[in-house]
């Protein structure tokens, strides 16, 4: 079983979102993630990063570490930041049954992460916020048995 591990650390600011998304896209391709699942992974990461920028760092920036790892056919993406923490259980889920004009703006980030990924875990300890998102059976069977290709530059 091939294990692929990659990490990127950038300033947690919207301007760095394209670099983060390129890192995730390249990691997915290198790992052999099923193209049909790659969009889900990328959207979940984008939503998570935007939440860090807006809520944890409140637009002021700070380090954001994005790790990508495979284990067999599963992938795990971990985000670490040093911003303001929160209790995800206190976030009210959006009422997606309401017509669009009756819904409140925002609030879909966590909802999308939970819907798109198979596992979403938050931990907050000693000034470090950690989010782990897992997508199971994302890597093709053939790719899971191959040595990793070149790494992200």
Image: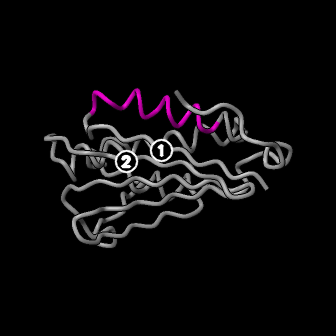
Q: Which residue is mark 1?
A: 7
Measuring from the top left, give residue 150's x and y in whole percent.
66, 31
In this image, 16 relative to 116: left or right?
A: left
Q: Is the residue marked by circle 1 packed among few (<14), some (14-19), or many (20+) residues within 10 Å?
A: some
| The residue stretch that appears in magenta | 14-28
Rendered image: mark on residue 65: 2
Measuring from the top left, give residue 68's x and y in whole percent.
54, 48
Disc 1 secondary structure class: strand
Q: Is the residue marked by circle 2 packed among few (<14), some (14-19), or many (20+) residues within 10 Å?
A: some
Q: Main secondary structure of the magenta part?
A: helix
Residue occupying the point 18% across, 59% down = 84
User: Looking at the image, which is closer to me, 2 or 111?
Assistant: 2
Rendered image: mark on residue 77: none
Q: Are marks 2 and 1 in contact (CB under 8 Å)?
A: yes
Establish if 32 lies above or below 145. above
State the image quarter where residue 6 is shown: top right
Residue occupying the point 59% across, 61% down = 118
User: Looking at the image, which is closer to me, 66 or 53?
Assistant: 66
Identify the image quadrant of the N terminus.
bottom right
Measuring from the top left, give residue 72's x and y in whole percent.
74, 57
State the image quarter where residue 12 is shown: top left
Disc 2 secondary structure class: strand
Measure the alpha-carbon separation of dots 2 and 1.
7 Å
In this image, 32 relative to 56: left or right?
A: right
User: Looking at the image, which is closer to me, 59 or 8?
Assistant: 8
Q: Is residue 16 magenta?
A: yes
Residue occupying the point 43% across, 40% down = 8
Establish if 152 lies above or below 113. above
């Amino acid at each position: 079983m091939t294990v692929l591990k990659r990490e990127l650390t950038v300033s947690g600011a919207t301007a760095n979102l394209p670099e983060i998304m390129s890192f995730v896209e390249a990691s997915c391709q290198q790992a052999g993630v099923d193209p049909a699942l790659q969009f889900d992974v990328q959207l979940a990461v984008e939503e998570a990063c935007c939440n860090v920028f807006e809520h944890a760092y409140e637009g002021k920036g700070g380090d954001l570490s994005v790790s990508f790892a495979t284990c067999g056919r599963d992938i795990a993406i971990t985000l670490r930041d040093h911003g303001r923490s929160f209790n995800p259980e206190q976030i009210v889920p959006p009422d997606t049954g309401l017509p669009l004009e009756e819904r409140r703006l925002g609030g879909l980030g966590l909802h999308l992460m939970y819907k798109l990924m198979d596992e979403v875990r938050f931990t907050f300890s000693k000034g470090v916020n950690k989010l782990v998102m897992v997508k199971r059976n994302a890597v093709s069977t053939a790719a899971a048995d191959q040595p990793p290709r070149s790494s992200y530059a």
